[in-house]
Image (spheres, helix red, strand yellow):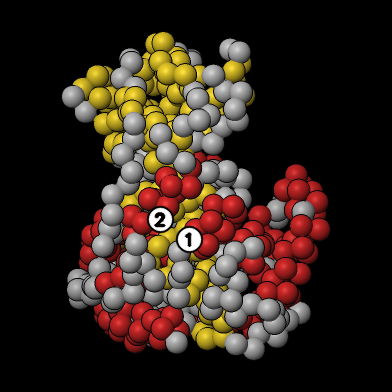
Amino acid sequence: MRKTLLQPAEVYVYKDDWIHSRKDGFEFEIARKESFLSLKVQKKDSEYNYTFLTSDRNAIPIKYDSKFVYTATIKGNVSDSLDVQLIVKGTGEGKQITSQYTGMDVEKILSFPANINNLELMLRVSGTGEANIEEVSISCYDAPLKDIEQSIYDLNEEADYLVLTNVYPEKNNLYRNMFVHRRAELYQENGASVDIFRLNAKETSLAYYKFNNTFVLSGGKEELTNVLNAKKYKKILIHFVDHHMIESIEASQAAKTPILIWIHGVETEKWYRRWFNFSGDAAALEKTLASIKENKKRTDFMKSVYESKTLNIKFIFVSKWFKEAVAEADTNAFVEDYSIIHNVVDDKMFDYVPKDANQRKKILSIRPFASHKYANDLSVKAILALSQKDYFEEFEFNIYGHGVLFDKTLEPIKHFSNVHIHNYFLPQTEIAKLHKEHGIFLCPTRLDSQGVSMCEAMSSGLIPITNGVTAIPEFVDDECGCLAGREDSQGLADAIDFLYHHPEEFQKKSHEAAKRMRKQCSIEKVINEELAEIYH
């Protein structure tokens, strides 16, 4: 049963007028509303990807007193790619000494040194879209820090298991390990109550929030150790393990607690696996070569974890290829205690409705643009190849995504009237709706341990057009999709051309794609396998 947080002695709601004074290529519409503050933000020509709002008075009208515990929160709603964060600056003698950030609907304990006099607030705004901000506030608690933290832990007192991860979705950032969140939801729907802990080793204080139906704690190594000392979990479930997580566990009373570690990708790879991030770019190559020592530290660490005799660990790999060809090969380790369980696909949300033959002309791409591993440049080349066909205008392409490579990658095709570009991510419910409207999922890749978004599209009956590299052939074959060769953009275009001219094959492959996902990655299969490991 959930308890309530200790009540603050005082709450300071910051309702001064907020202004945007910098001329940095952002266009703002700011309005005061009953909900407090409304923003419309459009990024124009700017070298920055963020800007700031400040108050007309700038300093919050309270003195900071280290005898009390303060928390900060910002509440509201955002749309499209807009991200609004609250910055609380600690000042002393008129100078900024330190600052802390908090995201939308997150409440964070402020950890400042004793020489702070005042608190000043700013809003950091990035992306474009609209926001309705309902509250910006500082709460002051006249109670010891450990009591405040304990009352936060007790908000989800019934949790038996801890899901430990490096990032986790929040209102401002929906696609931060969304697949980990979906697992947590499914565990709870099947009777396994969990806490989430999002570890960022740079953090120095505890924060918490609720995302959909999951309770999320966030903080650094000390905060994780404190949680493990205060709450006795039956098992710790780790995604994207690092040495900070292991050190925090070893420093706590949970050192003998059974641990399940899911191995997904970058945490166990040699540096050269991501050759595509520096191919043709001397600066990126130089940066990568400089990081080889750090990469060796990480793979040496993973070898020590794989072969640990002091911690009670079992490993879960999402594909056979990744365990054998990457995890063990790159660390020179032999993993003895493991299972292979694919990432779950929500076949209820991504349900199958038979496709009309005309939907083979509607092509969808939903991909991050943060790295060349997602091979969006190959999608662009495939579309350019198809543009030479006399039937090209019969196609409709919808491309969704976000990341530093977005604008540059899509520049060559943005002029086509049948190519619609959307610079933002979508919640899964909206993705499921788009699946219903399209017939082909264009998802080339250079490195995938599974390809979850591809599998979700297949579950909805979309035909994956991808590259037959890394783990992809464990999930796609010629019966249910189209596999081009490595770096083969023409092969991607040829696959779309084939489906255009063979509507009956399109419908057959669509049915087989949905059938394969239900057999291989459905909720019932995967969650039952994972719960068996959790309860064991």
**For residue 518, what is the image quadrant?**
bottom left
Determine whether 531 is above or below 364 in the image.
below
Residue drawn at x 50%, y 25% is: 65
Determine whether 338 is above or below 116 in the image.
below
Residue drawn at x 64%, y 89% is: 336
According to the picture, the residue beneath numbered tag 1 turns out to be 230
In the displayed structure image, the side of residue 278 where residue 190 appears, left or right: left
What percent of the width, then of the height, locates residue 199? 54, 55
Mark closer to the observer (2, 1): 1
**For residue 437, what is the image quadrant?**
bottom left
Image mark for residue 215: none
Instruction: Give amino acid for label 1.
Output: Ala
According to the picture, the residue beneath numbered tag 2 turns out to be 153
What percent of the width, then of the height, locates residue 230? 48, 60
In the displayed structure image, the side of residue 441 where residue 369 appears, left or right: right
Instruction: Give amino acid for label 2.
Output: Tyr
Determine whether 257 is above or below 45 in the image.
below
> SS for tag 2?
helix
**For residue 461, what is the image quadrant?**
bottom left
Q: Residues within 10 Å of mark 2 (few under 14, many from 20)?
A: many
